Image (cartoon, helix red, strand yellow):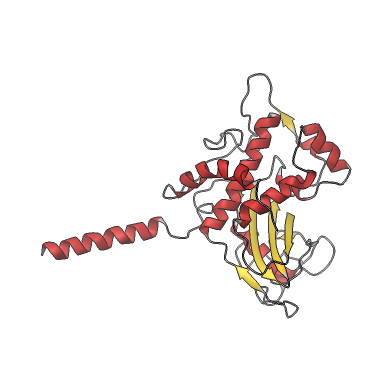
Amino acid sequence: MKIIILQLLLSHITLGLAELFEDVNENDIGNPYYHNFGSKLTICPEHANCLDGKFNFLCAKDPTKVSMNCKRYVPIAMDRRSRSKMVHMHNGLRNKLAYDMRLSKMNMIYWNTRLQLMAEQYLNLCRPYRDTCLIVGYGGFQVGQNSLYVPRRHEVLNEWQGRTVRQWYLELGSTIFNAQQLTEEQLKGKMGNLTQLILPRLEFVGCGAAIMFDGFFIVCYYYPPVNSSLKSELTFLKGSETCVCPMNRLMCSRHFNSLCGIDIESGNAIRIELNAAKFLLLYLVSFSLQ
């Protein structure tokens, strides 16, 4: 009888651990900031339109179908660990810039499964260059996109999440001195990916990755997009202020002290990865994408 009871207890504990570390999207559950672009059936815009006037690929009869133009196509699963790494690398970078430049109203960003779905469906087209559509959801929401194609790569890049964010961060070189430099370089047209990465009012990101043709392609979509100069977007802390948030984000993060938002955790896994992420971003600076 004792053995049976012990087996039942072990079974219960095992089930509990399985539920604790289940590959759920913690940023969809209990996130008061979550933006619903629509269900999987409604991310197609009402008028199937794109910013460039073309037909929206999200509205294809089967948007999950891989294009016949694809060669050596292998999609990479965006599991919970990959999603967490990508979000924390973004937030680690944003936190560093906000702290160094004393920026205020810098949001912490969250993963969005609808943007992830958009990225995955774009990858299915096998177009290893920038998307010009940038409209998602039944209401026709405009989004931004960052992308990176690593040629001569026929396998998953080790620590590709951190390396990708690092590559976008280094768009201006190894050193960013101040906010004025950022605004000047944007006006010169020298910033593409970095601009979207550091937009203070940015709220959500969703990414996908795949091996295709002769390389490795990473795509991230962002909401809201950059549609003005950084000069009009950047605001600064005053005096002894350490974190000032916009009206829709009244709380400062406990993990990223210069960012605004709620620290969403699931089974303590997010807390563990958040602490490591602050150091991982700096460590990855020494890596090469080749």
Q: In the rendered image, is residue 142 in sight?
A: no
Residue 144 percent across, percent down from the top left:
74, 53
The residue lying toward the viewer, choosing from 240 and 215, is 215
238 on left or right of 19: right
Residue 138 percent across, percent down from the top left:
69, 62
Q: How many numbered badges does the structure rendering display?
A: 0
Residue 117 percent across, percent down from the top left:
63, 64
* Image position of 168 with respect to 136: above or below: above
Residue placed farthest to the left in the image? 1
Residue depicted at x 65% and y 50%: 287
Residue 178 percent across, percent down from the top left:
77, 32
Residue depicted at x 67% and y 19%: 239
132 on left or right of 31: right
Q: Quadrant of residue 211?
A: bottom right
| Quadrant position of the C terminus in the picture | bottom right
* Image position of 257 with respect to 135: above or below: above
Residue depicted at x 79% and y 39%: 230
Residue placed farthest to the right in the image? 188
| Quadrant position of the N terminus in the picture | bottom left
The residue lying toward the viewer, choosing from 120 and 139, is 120
The residue lying toward the viewer, choosing from 111 and 161, is 161
